[in-house]
């Protein structure tokens, strides 16, 4: 059996003994991203440019899509609402952002948030989707006092010079 397979392979790939490379793909998009969960596949637009620096005031921006998805799926499964998520994602994929069927990642994040808000308690939603932190209000110019009073230091120098 083994020799027949080797003979068939040598006819199909004459360079099988050497390092053989298939030709590069010459049609279709060069980049492809997708989010997968079981048999569900959501085609996503590729990220453009370098990864953005996470905003320290928005903790949700620093969470990866896979982390948000995992936390949402785990909590919905514990509540028995996984079927609602599956149905929502199936309907969501039917309305792509482009003719090629791709969807923006932010829309998928918003879908997870919407389903979580409908089926989970506010505390559980806050755990998955933390609220942005309000920045400290800027201080007004001139509201700070100097740390040392200028007059007291000169007074002590003058007193020391008068004694000596």
Image (cartoon, rainbow, N blue to C red):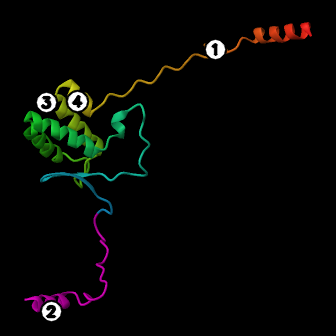
The local secondary structure at tag 4 comes to helix
Choose between 162 and 63: the one closer to the eye: 162
Residue 95, label in figure: none
The local secondary structure at tag 1 comes to loop
Q: Which of marks 2 and 3 is nearer the N terminus?
A: 2
Give how far apart the Cα atoms at labels 2 and 4 are.
60 Å
Q: Is residue 124 above or below residue 38?
A: above
Does the magenta-highlighted stretch encompass residue 8? yes
Instruction: Point out the image quarter for the N terminus.
Output: bottom left
Q: Earlier in the sequence, mark 3 or mark 1?
A: 3
Q: Report if the CB atoms under discs 2 and 4 are less than 8 Å apart.
A: no
Q: Badge 4 is on which residue?
A: 125
Q: Badge 2 is on which residue?
A: 7
Give how far apart the Cα atoms at labels 3 and 1 are.
50 Å
Q: Specify start and end residues of the magenta stretch as a single range.
A: 1-28
Instruction: Point out the image quarter for the C terminus.
Output: top right
Which residue is located at x 81 percent, y 8 percent? 155
Find residue 89 and report its horizontal and vertical position in percent.
Answer: 15, 43
Q: Badge 3 is on which residue?
A: 119
Q: Report if the CB atoms under discs 1 and 4 are less than 8 Å apart.
A: no
Q: Quadrant of residue 19?
A: bottom left
Q: Quadrant of residue 148?
A: top right
Q: Earlier in the sequence, mark 2 or mark 4?
A: 2
């Amino acid at each position: 059996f083994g020799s027949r397979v080797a003979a068939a392979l040598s006819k199909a790939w004459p360079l099988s003994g050497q390092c053989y490379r298939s030709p590069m793909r010459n049609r279709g998009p060069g980049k492809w991203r997708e989010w997968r969960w079981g048999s569900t596949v959501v085609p996503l637009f590729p990220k453009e440019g370098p990864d953005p620096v996470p905003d320290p005031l928005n903790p949700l921006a620093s969470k990866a899509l896979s982390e948000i998805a995992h936390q949402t799926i785990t909590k919905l499964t514990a509540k028995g609402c996984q079927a609602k998520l599956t149905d929502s994602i199936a309907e969501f994929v039917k309305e792509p952002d482009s003719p090629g069927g791709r969807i923006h990642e932010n829309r998928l994040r918003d879908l997870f948030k919407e389903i979580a808000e409908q089926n989970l308690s506010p505390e559980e939603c806050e755990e998955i989707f933390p609220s942005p932190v309000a920045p400290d209000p800027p201080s007004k110019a001139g509201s700070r006092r100097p740390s040392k009073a200028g007059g007291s230091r000169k007074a002590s120098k003058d007193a020391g010079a008068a004694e000596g």
